[in-house]
Amino acid sequence: MKTSTDRRRFLRLTMAGIIGITLGDQILQKKALASTELAHLEEDDPQAAALKYTHKSPHADQHCSNCMLLQGNEGDEWRPCAIFPGKAVNAKGWCSAWTAKPA
Ligand code: SF4
């Protein structure tokens, strides 16, 4: 037999679950949008220029897509980079902070 305390507890747990699912879903949506909505890093951005960033790497074997500092989704043309927070770099780009991705 259910008591009013059981019902209150059930309602509290249900509400907590609904709030948790809603917040979790919003966080996942923000993460998914993050890499696609970032502004592209411009080559003439002062920080980019200081690190000689270019959208097309001058090195055959060094490019953003094989740099360990690149973030985001594999295969995306523009992705976040740890060196340039809030901006996306071209996967074919390069800068002087390039660091080989561990094999
Ligand atoms: Fe590209 Fe430089 Fe960022 Fe590496 S650190 S991903 S080379 S912009």
Image: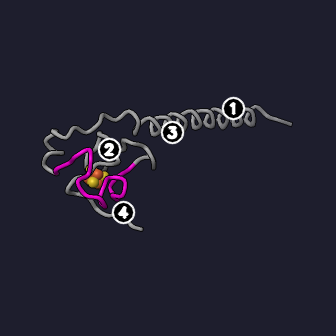
Which SS class for mark 2? Answer: strand
97 up-or-down from 10: above or below: below
First in sequence, mark 3 or 2: give its number: 3
Where is mark 4, residue-wise?
A: 101
Label 1 Cα crowd, 10 Å radius (few <14 / some 14-19 / many 20+): few
What distance separates the C-alpha of mark 2 from that of mark 4? 16 Å
Nearest to the eye among marks 1 and 4: give it. 4
Tag on residue 28? 3
The overriding secondary structure of the stretch rendered in magenta is: loop
Q: Amino acid at mark 3?
A: Leu
Where is mark 2, residue-wise?
A: 90
The residue under the point 35% across, 47% down is 91
102 up-or-down from 69: above or below: below
Which SS class for mark 1? Answer: helix
First in sequence, mark 1 or 2: give its number: 1
Q: Amino acid at mark 2?
A: Asn
Which quadrant would the C terminus be assigned to in this image?
A: bottom left
Q: Is residue 58 left or right of residue 49?
A: right
The answer to whether mark 1 and mark 2 are in CB contact below 8 A is no
Residue range highlighted in magenta: 52-71
Q: Amino acid at mark 1?
A: Leu
Nearest to the eye among marks 1 and 2: give it. 2
Tag on residue 11? 1
